[in-house]
Amino acid sequence: WDHIQGLPFFAPLFNPGFSWNVYGPQGLAGSFEDTLSGQMKHDYFPVTIKQLGAKVTYHDLVEGSFQLEGVRVKTRYLNHTVLTLGYKLESGGISIAYITDHEPFNHRLAVEGYERSYDGSTNSEDDRHVDFFIGVNLLIHDCQYTAQEYGQGKTGWGHSTVEYVVDIALAASVKQLALFHHDPNRTDDQVDEIVRYAQERATDIAKRKGLSTVPEIWATAEGTNVTFGERANFVRKNSVDIGMHPSEDLLAKQFFQRRGVKIEGKIVLLGLECNTRFASDLKEDLEKDKLTVKVCEDVDSILEACSQSNPSLVVLKQSISGGNAVDICLKIREMGEWGEDTLFLVVAKNHDDLEMGRAESNIIPKESWLVEPVSVAYIRTRVRMSLLRAPCKWVRASIPANEEARLVALKESCMMDVNQPEGLKRITRVARQLFDVGAACFTLLAKDHVKLISAEGLDCINIPRDAAMCAHVVSDQDFTLVADALEDDRFADNPLVQGAPYLRFYAGMPIWSKAKDGQSYIIGSFCLLDQKPREFNTEQLRSLQDLASLAREEFGAISAEAQRARCLGVS
């Protein structure tokens, strides 16, 4: 309640002329509204939440993103003793990240400092934490302790150190860092001293690593106002900038209901010593979340329970009587289709065992490994995080059977050498106006990326192949229509849908090219894109087919010219 107990004293909530939307993390045992109303029961407070005069609408959030008027909101689960979300707000080229209660996933980093693990083997979850707020104008981050204080019994309490926060702010290239969630025992002078220490650490690291900029660092205080000067430009070399604004605001509750999962009644199996207080306390807490919990203490009983009950998630000690976690996970995976979808959390005894286990197994995701000491509250939160994460709705296009020959045809066409040819530019201009869409473009599908060789309303940049919708055109060898990407299980979690340019509609026609072997191959597509859902009728389809036919003729002429230029050595 320490984070919400001020809410009942917010006077505008009692004004009948006011209307409020309140957003917060969805719980397992109840809604966000239930969490807020619990502190306002008559046992604790003279006015119940139902007696507020203003109209209040509550929105349950999980991990994801949504649009509120001109603000894009992204959420991510943090590492705390209770279920907690971090927030990133983006609007008008300005972005702010608000990280309230968070402890490094790798506890070592709280003391030793953060370094990105480029091999993805050690700090993968902390790396993803940094990626969440990379490049923001302002990072507001929990840093309750110093490294020295953290090492004096604060491990597992759910908070960060100043050293860790300075390091991740530098790694994320944030513009300003606001030190937040000060320890209640600190005096103002002590907070000022921590700010000076943080500034010195940032300067020293930047000098050592040759960084050109250091974030402005200050401590949060009541009444502080932050004014941003120049609007930030977040259109980088490899990002997408579509020349339009989202046309439809999505309420967070509606969005997350669409992609959320129901977890009540799901089965969790604990591979722990049955007779320990830890196992019994964890079982009791998880059952409060309306989960069905089974506890087993050796390999045989775990496998038998799994075959009978098909648990959604299994929590294991790395070493357990009769075997080890990796072997157990392999056997569960082999039990059938349900076993392939089972989630795992594995607790290692120490960091050396953790890193050895990660190195030996690719069956258990790196972020699913935990290390002792762990608390009941921490594992309960990780169980919640795992179960609340919806299944990934992003299907990568399959590789065509003739992929090798197709890539040869693409190379022979010389179309990868051209950029914004006037003939194709005319077609994209006409298409964008005719169909009244946000963008029209021609794409080429290379081995690992997509190149836009002509586009109207969209920057001509490279897009990763696995995120490109036109890859499905090549894979299916047919016209591809996505009326509403958020409602399509192939694309709802695609980064081009969840992030810039926030695509909702796609229509793509295949572009064929004849190779020297006499066969024709699909080397790219002619696409229409928009940020709002659309229907596509038969007449529009015929018009797109007509334009695609013209485009193929233009492609052939441009390709022939490019091949002649290559033979003559002309760039």
Image: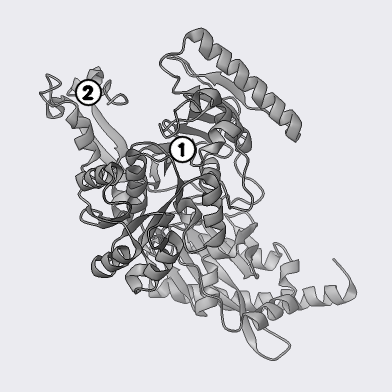
Instruction: Name the mark on residue 88.
Output: 1
Residue lying farthest bottom? 518
Label 2 vs label 1: CA separation?
Answer: 25 Å
Front-most of residues 283 and 12: 283
Instruction: Find residue 326 and report its horizontal and vertical position in percent.
Output: 45, 62
What residue is rendered at 38% in x and 64% in y?
Answer: 488
Give the answer, above or below, for where 352 lies relative to 20: below
Query: What amino acid is labelled 2 in the image?
Result: Leu
Q: Quadrant of residue 100?
A: top left
- Mark 2 vs 1, N-terminal side: 2
Q: Tell how many labels.
A: 2
- In-image side of 427 versus 539 (left or right): right
Tag 2 residue: 13
- Pointer 2 local density, CA inside 10 Å: few below 14, some 14–19, many at least 20: many
Residue lying farthest right? 568
Given contact means CB atoms under 8 Å apart, are the residues at marks 2 and 1 in contact?
no
Instruction: Find residue 563 and report its horizontal and vertical position in percent.
Output: 80, 77
What residue is rendered at 43% in x and 55% in y?
Answer: 319
